[in-house]
Image (cartoon, rainbow, N blue to C red):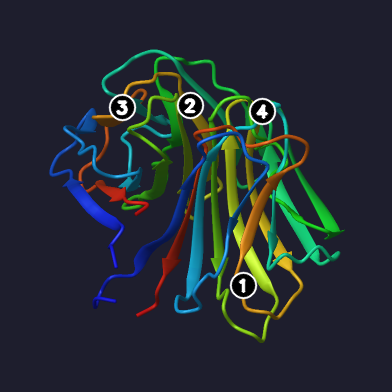
Amino acid sequence: MAAGMTYFPIATNTLGSATSSVTFSSISGSYTDLSIVINSGSTASGQDIRCRFNSDTGSNYSFTYLTGNGSAASSNRATSQTFMPLDYNGYLSGSIATTTIINCMNYSNSTTYKTILGRFSTTAFGTDAAVGLWRSTSAITSIEFLTSASTFLAGSTFTLYGIAAA
Amino acid sequence: MAYSYKLIEAKTLGSTAASITFNSIPQTYTDLNVLCSIRGSTNGDGIYVQFNGNTSSYSVRQLFGDGSSVASNTPGQTNYGTIGYTTTVTSNTFGNLSIYVPNYTSSNNKSYSADSVQEANQTQAYMNLVAGLWSNSSAITSLTIACQVGNLETNSTFYLYGIKSS
């Protein structure tokens, strides 16, 4: 890693066909933080985008949102979920028009639970800012993205970046 | 290992200007991120973005707080995409603004996410989260930022970064 270079693409996936889930696996622990950028849509409009870490399907996820749908603002939360819901109004639309940016801090430590900050935007439904928690001290080595009831559209892009502190 | 986050162009206003434009944006990146420090000449003025000089097909849903309430709305303007607001109630105070545009060279409509804050140590301040869409399949080759009524003030800065996914 060259000195002064801190933001690196780890993996990217452009879907060649509609796909029910996308997984980044074998994530190196050599970075400080992770950033994920998703530009996507779903075959059925209005679906959630969700994620799981390390294939954990236990009730270990929670999430709090600040959200606006274009006419009203509110805050909501979900606790003890079996996945991390990544939006409230920033749903996937029926075209590739949803921008999702997720930052996952200190993902590789084996001491603390893991947290994320997220921004989810689509003009079809609204925009969210969110914080999420995965109640596990395991280092994050894989991230799976899925939708609530449909598939991601072909052409959707998923990119994982690693951020190095030094 | 590829370095994925690169400064394309920086602009610092030496005098007030109605707008700034990044022209001839290279088509060699995956995403664009514009980071700005902005002060406007008119209090409460809207800040907007236009792509390729185009004056149609913009839509926005936004979530905002002004220090006393939170709300969400859908601005009706289609000739530009609102991305934030100015405050001039405290001198020497500039706001921060980030615009993220994924897949700016694709043939899909262009979605973007914008976050801005205008803190002024006064009763009036703004925080905006924006879901934006430019319904146009053209690759983005230029990007303009301007105020709806007033000017962009001297010493406002604008940094355009290109981000590569591989």
Tag 3: Cα neighbours inside 10 Å, few (<14), some, or many (≥20)? some
Please tell me if label 1 and label 3 are on a single chain.
no
Residue assigned mark 4: A43
- Which mark's residue is nearer the viewer, 3 or 2? 3
Q: Amino acid at mark 1?
A: Ile
Please tell me if label 4 and label 2 are on a single chain.
no
Q: Residue furthest bottom?
A: A111
Residue assigned mark 3: B139
Quarter holding residue A44: top right
Residue assigned mark 1: A140
Tag 4: Cα neighbours inside 10 Å, few (<14), some, or many (≥20)? many
Please determine whether, in this image, residue A145 is positioned above or below residue A53. Answer: above
Q: Secondary structure at mark 4?
A: loop
Cα–Cα gap, marks 4 and 1: 29 Å
Please tell me if label 4 and label 1 are on a single chain.
yes
Cα–Cα gap, marks 1 and 3: 35 Å
